[in-house]
Image (tube, helix red, strand yellow):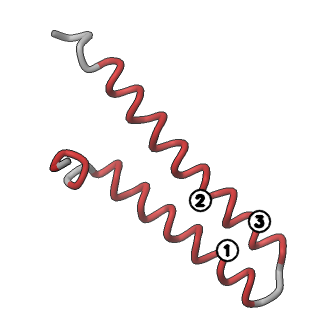
Amino acid sequence: MKEKLTSRKFWLACAAFLGSMGTSIAGMSHGNDKVTMIGLICSMLSAAIYAAAEAYVDAHRNDGA
């Protein structure tokens, strides 16, 4: 767990998720459905990209050993 909390990938994914959620909330508050959808899609993509990056690192962790 300590590795996750000190990971730059994790904090970048968190920042991307929070920024995307902020965009989505701003879209909802202004009644702009397109901005809301863009925020939601980007928040899902940030989580998916982080998961893919972690899976790639995990898969290649033992290659050099």
Which residue does the image show at 59% across and 67% down from the upper left? 20
Q: Position of residue 19 (x, y in %)?
A: 53, 71
Which residue does the image show at 15% across and 50% down from the upper left? 2
Residue at numbered disc 2:
43
Q: Quadrant of residue 14?
A: bottom left
Task: Tell me if mark 3 has few (under 14), some (14-19) or many (20+) residues whose alpha carbon lies within 10 angstroms of its own.
Answer: some
Q: In the rendered structure, find residue 55 and report the number of the disc placed on it.
A: none
User: Does residue 20 sit above or below 4 in this rendering?
Assistant: below
User: Does residue 40 sit above or below 62 in this rendering?
Assistant: below
Q: Is residue 5 left or right of residue 15?
A: left
Between disc 1 and disc 2, whose residue precedes? Answer: 1
User: Does residue 64 sit above or below 59 in this rendering?
Assistant: above
Give me the C-alpha separation between circle 1 and circle 2.
9 Å
Q: What is the three-letter code of the residue carrying label 1? A: Ser
Residue at numbered disc 1:
24
Q: How many marks?
A: 3
- Dot 3 lies on which element? helix
Which residue does the image show at 54% across and 52% down from the upper left? 46
Q: What is the three-letter code of the residue carrying label 2? A: Ser
Between disc 3 and disc 1, whose residue precedes? Answer: 1
* Label 1 close to label 2 by CB (< 8 Å): yes
Q: Is residue 14 left or right of residue 23?
A: left
Q: In the rendered structure, find residue 37 and report the number of the disc placed on it.
A: 3
Which residue does the image show at 59% across and 59% down from the upper left? 43
Q: Position of residue 29 (x, y in %)?
A: 73, 89
Quarter in which the C terminus is drawn: top left
